[in-house]
Image (tube, rainbow, N blue to C red):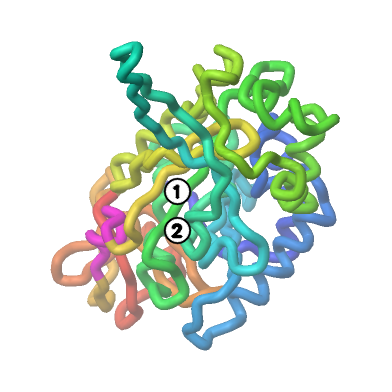
Amino acid sequence: MTFLLRTAREKDLESLYRMAKGTGGGFTNLPPDRPTLQAKLERAAKSFARDDGQITNDLFVFILEDTTDGKVRGTCQAFSQVGTELPFYSYRIGRITQHSKELDRTFRAEMLTLCTDLDGASEVGGLYLDATERSAGVGKLLARSRYLFIAMHRQRFGEMTLAELRGAIDDAGNSPFWDGLAGRFFDMSFRDADEFNGTHGNQFIADLMPKHPIYTALLSEAARQVMGQPHYSGRPAMRMLESEGFAFQNYVDIFDGGPTMIARTDQIRTIQDARTATVSAVAPGPAEATHLIATGRLADFRACLGSVREDGTIDEAAAGLLGIGAGDAITYAPA
């Protein structure tokens, strides 16, 4: 395995832009807009540079690099706390039961309520991996390395962590959920609204969307069917999140209706399983990686797949990727 997860740098702008263009839309945290991506890198640099242990509006951007050719193959992000400067809007799916004595009938209705219940939670998002690398555990390295980063900087993150999955979008870039709900209140296509949200934020939704609960029976059948369902390409990501302890708790994205997955930060499996050690030696390891290994604080953070023995011996390939040797500190979890 020659892939190294490291922190993003200014030089990664063009690689981020290339990946953003390849998402196909609906990735709010990775918009195909150079100025916005540049601002993200600048914000991340400030977050990595700050080491006062306070939780605030931090953004951490990571890059997956193939060290054989130096090419960037993926990216992901972690937000220390959402909703600190601007509200973090979601739709909460709720239900109400009503009974009519005269008709002797009970009605159960489902409704969507615009809310900011998730303000203060941490978020993992912005994950993209080149299609050519979506095998051999590379996706797990990209996704799960964030949890080791959180474990190593626990005071910088909240009690809850969320992940928004992209909702159903057709090949033409249209969203049935948007067309059935928000699109009725805005003179904008889903693609235009998504691009505007990625570069300007979603305050315009809060300004113009109705504040009262919306009965889902009033939505189109197409909108109801995709509510809380991930885009077909996001189903593996949903299964991976579920394996880490995330669950769908009836919150959906206000644009495409995609599911918001939520977990208690300290109960995320990789964080629970994380262990620390001091490297005692470097030696040849097994052919198949057994651990996810990380080292370094903040801007020096890096991670890879490798093997760690109980006595602290690390395999030489991982040691070379991470640039560490005997006496260095590592944090690791089962692969």
| Residue 173 seen in the current view | yes
Using residue 179 as the reference point, say whether residue 236 is left or right of it: left
Residue at (37% x, 23% y) in the render? 108
Query: Where does the image place residue 125, in percent across and percent down from the top left?
Result: 54, 49
| Residue extending furthest toward the bottom | 52
Q: Please tell me whether residue 244 is drawn above or below residue 82 in the rendered image.
A: above
> Which stretch did the figure color magenta?
267-275
Query: Where does the image place residue 49, in percent across and percent down from the top left?
Result: 61, 80
Residue type, numbered disc 2: Arg
Task: Report the front residue among 314 and 222.
Answer: 222
> Marks 2 and 1: in contact by CB < 8 Å?
yes
Assign a secondary structure to mark 1: helix
Disc 2: which residue = 146
Residue type, numbered disc 1: Ala
Dot 1: few (<14), some (14–19), or many (≥20) neighbours within 10 Å? many
| Residue extending furthest toward the front | 102
Assign a secondary structure to mark 2: helix
Residue at (68% x, 16% y) in the render? 171
Query: Where does the image place residue 33, in percent across and percent down from the top left?
Result: 81, 47
| Residue extending furthest toward the left | 310
Q: Please tell me whether residue 186 is drawn above or below residue 32 in the rendered image.
A: above
In the rendered structure, find residue 143 and report the number of the disc placed on it.
1
In the rendered structure, find residue 112 and report the number of the disc placed on it.
none
Query: Where does the image place residue 261, in percent across and percent down from the top left?
Result: 42, 43
Residue at (29% x, 68% y) in the render? 282
Residue at (37% x, 53% y) in the render? 305
Task: Report the front residue among 199 and 328.
Answer: 199
Task: Report the front residue among 229 and 331.
Answer: 229
